[in-house]
Amino acid sequence: MKRNNLISQIALTVVLALLSIAVVIPFIILVSVSLSNETDISYYGYSLLPRQVDLTAYKYVFRNPTTILNAYKVTAIFSFASMVLSTLMISLFAYPLSRKNFKPRRKLSFIMYFTTMFNGGLVPSYILITQYLHLDNKIWVYIIPGLFSVWSAFVMRTFFQGLPESIIESAYIDGAGEYRILFEIVYPLSKPVLATIAVGIFLGQWNNWYTSMLYIDKPELYSLQYMLQRLMDNIALLQENQQLAEMITDAVDIPSETVRMAMAVVVAGPVLFVFPFFQKYFVKVMFLGSVNG
């Protein structure tokens, strides 16, 4: 029996190691290409290590560092603000739904679920945000429309329902109110789901380019993703129009492939440093269903 368990553990370790390698190798190639020479990529293709280190792609991306840093600042502001405000709002809504003594919880849950079955469409959303809420060309357009998520509310409600009822009842007996129970008891016990929801919101906002395309005309309010997308569009335009490229200094030999990879590294870098700190919470939430069952 022990031998079978040992074989199973070894097999599982090997499979997980291979999966980890399969995930890490593409990112190593991404960094390698971003540090390579465009000519080497054209002749030899992608490789794990650059044949010669060339920072031309990063020099082009940071050709105007003020623009990049401003896009970083804007994206960081609305990403963190959305993460905090949205997590708070979702938790304040999910907590009552998890309480058995809250009578309207079934009706509210149905209303929440019902909204996921229909979509108002782009045109009504655009009219609402620009003509009625007047959020266009304001940083709040990144934050307010996406403050609430039905899926996140259901996940958080399920986690709250799995907390020991005896702890909350003891707090009631000691005279604690609902807000004190939520902030001093439920929140500390719900760090895994709160962290998971918060990071998911942060990642979604960090990769937001669609909002800038629709509602932002001011370059100082462009998100990082949208600003880099415009940079790639400019590169493609210059490569298609040779006469226009020759009129711009150093624009004839623009490294398109390495620039693309350098932009991916620039965008993903900060997130890669944040993610490991929340990894332990993701594992707990993944097993939420099996524990409750």
Image: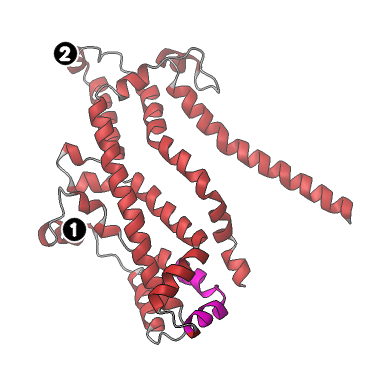
* Circle nearer the N terminus (2, 1): 1
Q: SS of the residue at dot 2? A: loop
Measured as percent of width and height from the top left, residue 279 is found at 54, 49
**In the rendered image, which quarter is residue 135 located in?**
bottom left
Task: Give the crowd class for mark 1: few <14, some 14-19, many >=20 residues within 10 Å.
Answer: few
Which residues are the magenta region? 155-172
Q: Quadrant of the N terminus?
A: bottom right
Q: Is residue 243 left or right of residue 80?
A: left
Task: Give the crowd class for mark 2: few <14, some 14-19, many >=20 residues within 10 Å.
Answer: few
- In magenta segment, residue 161: yes
Measured as percent of width and height from the top left, residue 94 is found at 41, 72
Q: SS of the residue at dot 1? A: helix
Which of the labelled discs sits on residue 123, or is there none? 1
Q: Which residue is mark 2?
A: 247
Q: Is residue 254 left or right of residue 197?
A: left
Measured as percent of width and height from the top left, residue 131 is found at 10, 59
Say if 149 sits above or below 211 in the image. Answer: below
Dominant SS type (magenta): helix
Residue at point 46% right, 23% down?
33
- In magenta segment, residue 170: yes
- Image colouring: secondary structure
Residue at point 26% right, 13% down?
252
**In the rendered image, which quarter is residue 235 located in?**
top left
In depth, the one of 102 and 61 nearer the eye is 102
Q: Is residue 243 left or right of residue 17?
A: left
Q: Quadrant of the C terminus?
A: bottom right
Q: What amino acid is at disc 1?
A: Val
